[in-house]
Image: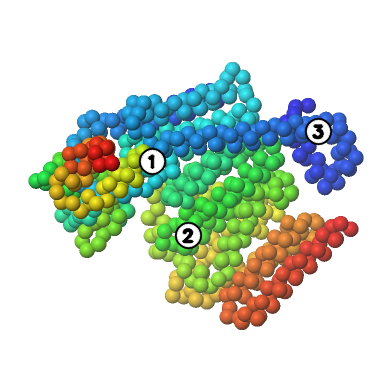
Amino acid sequence: MKKTNIRWLNDQLPDLIEQDVITDDVADSLRDHYKMSELEQAQSLSIMTIILASIGALFVGGGIILIFAHNWETLGKTTRTILAFAPLVIAQALLISAFYPKQRSRAWHEVCGVLVFCSVASSIAIIGQTYHISNDTQAFLTWWFVLVAPLVFILRAHLMSVLMMILGTALCMQYDSPYWLCLLVLIGYYLKVNFSGNQLLRSQTGWLLGICFGFCMASIGRIPDSSGLSIMLMMSISVATYLLGYLIEPNNRFWSRPLTNIGAVGIAGFTIALTFRDLLNDISPLFSKGSIDALSMLTWHQTLFFASLMVLSISLIIFNIARKRFESLPLASLFLIYLLFLILLPERSHAAFSYFAWAIVFSLILLGIGIWYVYLGVTRDSTSQLNFGLILMMSLVLMKFFDQDFSLISRGIVFIVIGLVFIGVNIWHSRRKKS
Amino acid sequence: MIKLLIAITIVAQLLIPASMILRYESVLDHGELMRFEVRPVDPVNPFRGRYVRLNFSQERVPSKNNEKLPQRSDAYALISVDDQGLANVTSLSVNKPENGTYLKVSVRYRSAGLYSFRYPFDRYYANEAKAPKIEGALRDRRDNTLDDLKVVAEIKIKDGFGVIEELYVGKQTIHEYLQHNK
């Protein structure tokens, strides 16, 4: 059997034992048969090599950038131009050698990735330094990202991809559309990792990607002059993340489902915000003049982003219904309910009662979803589902409580009660699970 | 497929910096020479090292024919040369001028009928030891009105794009000036 298949089997064993598909003894026999302990030892050695080599390459790359930052103005323009290209050409030569004449080790790929990443930056930077270029941070970062992006898919270089995630997120946060395209590259990398079969790499990349999404949300999900449409876009990003995770993260363990979990938190968070009447008051109906004006002000790439996300979210919901995966629907349907709210909301002058009624509707639906998740957690012995349901209900109570003008003593008591309920239910659940 | 992708990536990684060099060299070779009076300050960039930030004596001007300019956007600055041979921005416009020397600048905000804008060349990169010396040596020259002590940036301009050629104190380059005033 191939080493990658043995690794995959090794990753699956704890799940198979947990789901009572095989016993501990069978798992041990399989480990012995496929010599998994030796493989694990060899793998841990190779992981150490990869990590140390990557860190070394990062230091070398950073060193090159710092040495050039010294500014060797006495060397003259021609020499400095050659110097600008020298590290890049060397890194590219290493990159070619990672594939030809034969495919090199993962550590080699990691080193090449980091060196090319740093040398592309240093070569653009030294040109800027030589010609005294100003106000070009955006162009500098964009070229850096674009010129390294294909390597995310070509090389097996995780550290470089993590650095690209940071760079792409910084671009998304700092500059407007169409920098959401950077996120597409990062999603592509996650999909690539997902099919590689390495559990650790998969969950690490997924969590990082989810965190990047969170950081970018405020900039990519903002539609100027329309809080209603902005929430719709942000909810749609969360729903797409949640359902995409649901599709490609079949493992039931909490840490193995980063996109699903982060998407779920996003949907729940935005819906909790919608239970506040003050926020609802600022929202204009979907077909009102304000919303239509805001949509008409969007550039073509903003419109494309908005439309694609709507289509993607709704398609994923329909896909899940068609596949009878009803478990994902309660959370995902919150997006549809919000759409319904935007469509049904009357014009501002007649909306006072309507806003109040919708705040109650959103609160009740969230409460229902919270209870349903607690029920799922208890019946399936799933701590993460139980806690998600509890957190949902408690956040709702806490938010409502802070929304009203209660005294500090009553707020304190509610805090203590919620804390005790949380601890108590978790202790009860873990005892029940053990027994 | 991977071979092709690697080849395209490598060529692009070399071509983009090379095209940047060609563009700047073309401006330096064929651009029109302009002299701007400046006031230097010394900050640092993590990738490119120390530089002397150049504050220009003229950073607020009216728009051409009182046209309305959107804030935080690009505009064209029309440039004229005064009796002392120094360049001045006369007005800003969103429309590209058909003749005369012009620069592409970024408009910041409008105040009292004048637009504040940012020049596309406000950094003079220098050696990490030399940059603070330039700033220190030039600090006292900032408000000097004598021609031989004015700090002037020589800029080559072509098609609205400008590249700094050299920094001068009077008739000496900044490097000569530092050598003579250690």
Residue B157 visible? The answer is: no
Single out the mark in the foreground, 2 or 3: 3
Task: Name the one closer to the observer, B149 or A283.
Answer: B149
The amino acid marked with disc number 1 is Glu
The quadrant of the picture occupied by the N terminus of chain B is top right
- Helix, strand or loop under label 3: helix
Mark-to-mark CA distance, 2 and 3: 52 Å
The amino acid marked with disc number 2 is Leu
Neighbours of disc 1 within 10 Å: few (<14), some (14-19), many (20+): some
Image position of A375 with respect to A142: above or below: below
Single out the mark in the foreground, 2 or 1: 1
Q: Is residue A317 left or right of residue A390?
A: left
Residue marked by disc 2: A229
Residue B101 visible? The answer is: yes
Image coordinates of residue A412 in percent, x first then y, are: 66, 77
Q: Output the chain of dot 3.
A: A
Task: Residue A36: give its label.
Answer: 3
Q: Output the chain of dot 2.
A: A
Task: Residue B128: give its label.
Answer: 1
Are callouts 3 and 1 both on one chain?
no
Q: Residue furthest left?
A: B83
Image position of A306 with respect to A128: above or below: below
- Helix, strand or loop under label 1: loop
Mark-to-mark CA distance, 2 and 1: 49 Å
